[in-house]
Amino acid sequence: MADYYDLLGVSRDADGDTLKRAYRRMARQYHPDINKEPGAEERFKEIGRAYEVLGDPQTRARYDQFGEAGLGGSGGMPDMGDMGGFADLFETFFSGFGGGPSSGPQRSGPQKGEDLRYDLTIDFIQAVFGQEREIKIPHLETCDTCDGSGAKPGSGPTNCATCGGVGQVRRATRTPFGSFTQVAECPACNGTGQVISDPCGSCNGQGVKQVRKKLRINIPAGVDTGTRLRVAGEGNAGLRGGPSGDLYVFLKVKNHSKLRRDGLTVLSEVHVSYLQAILGDTIEVETVDGPANLEIPVGTQPNSILTLENKGIPKLGNPVARGNQRISVNVKLPTRFSEEERSLLEELATHYSAKGKQHHHHNSGLFGRLFGQN
């Protein structure tokens, strides 16, 4: 069992006000209506139990001396109503947070609906320029037969007979160390304090029902894998008149066969012949806008990077601003020649060798290696 002082994050000599402040802070952090993480509700109950013991000087003294074993004491645990206003503190603190398991009728108030997640895969070009998409999502909608009340039209909820409309029941628990009283959520009404005696047939008294809804969502230009779009109010319907949750659309972008993305820059490759690289040329390349002309300058070196301006990705939220396309040039060297090509290249090699006789041996050796001469 965790140490109660450690649970509340206070020292063993903390005074009553320090305990109360620590309890409020920790209870707010782990309250199940606020914290949806696994284990939060159990931690919340442990925090409540710790303050229940340490908030009363008598039980605190027994706990300090004997630990958990000392809490059975003579007469058992005091009733919740006798614990120095603990119950009042609990209810007043949580009245502004939609209530909790021990806050009684406040839980019967409106509750916001849950948020939903929808994963959507789109094409590369759709991510670049955006589009409007229609999707179908299953979500909870307010029952139109009973307007979300859960009761058959003409009837309504009544106070729970088990807890008298309080939403709580007291349970006496006997242990080898004595007995103590525990306040728990009423199992008959789930803490709401009210029950539906004549439920709506359309939603089985739930007030909401599952519906598959078509939605048109606008995907803005420039999105990427991991972009999250929020569609307000399209999550699950709230309970008892509470607002609906939101829908979050998580995007995944398919790869393109020839184009890649790096931020706002589009990356691609082209292959040109050694003659195109030497003499220059204009070729057609693929861009996100479709085919475009790319000028290969005279004397382009292998692995050079050429740029097409404003052919990149629009900036998300400001699509007028666009990146560029950067194109890596791969130069293909031939491995076979016709007799005519070989003759012309040898003549060219001789020409260059003659212009710089001091490099004659080097040049002829280079051309020999490049073009298969022995």
Image: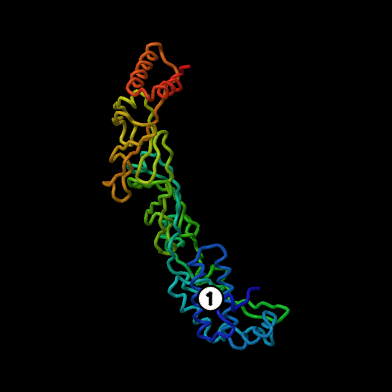
Which residue is located at x 36 percent, y 35 percent?
A: 304
The answer to whether residue 95 of the structure is visible from this angle is yes
Q: Is residue 25 above or below residue 293?
A: below
- The quarter of the rendered structure image containing the N terminus is bottom right
Residue at (38%, 25%) from the top-left corner?
A: 359
In the displayed structure, would residue 278 be above or below residue 310? above
Image x and y of residue 149, in percent: 44, 63
Q: Examine the image and state in which quarter residue 266 appears.
A: top left
Colouring used for the render: rainbow
Residue shown at 26%/46% (left/top)? 320
Amino acid of disc 1: Gly
- Determine which quarter of the picture holds residue 128: top left
* 308 on left or right of 189: left
Residue 171 left/right relative to 325? right
Q: Position of residue 338 (x, y in %)?
A: 41, 12
- Give residue 314's position: percent from left, percent from top: 31, 45
Within 10 angstroms of label 1, few (less than 14), some, or many (20 or more) residues? few
Examine the rendered structure and indicate whether residue 335 appears above or below residue 38.
above
The residue lying toward the viewer, choosing from 71 and 258, is: 258
Camera sees residue 169 = no
In this picture, residue 203 sits left or right of residue 280: right
Nearer to the camera, 158 or 32: 32
Of residues 158 and 360, the one nearer the viewer is 360
Looking at the rendered structure, the secondary structure element under dot 1 is loop
Residue at the farthest right position: 176
User: According to the image, label 1 marks what residue?
Assistant: 164
Q: Nearer the viewer, residue 177 or 149?
A: 177
Looking at this rendering, what residue extends furthest in the left direction? 320
Q: Is residue 33 left or right of residue 162?
A: left
Spot the residue most to the front: 358
Question: What percent of the width, then of the height, locates residue 263?
Answer: 37, 46
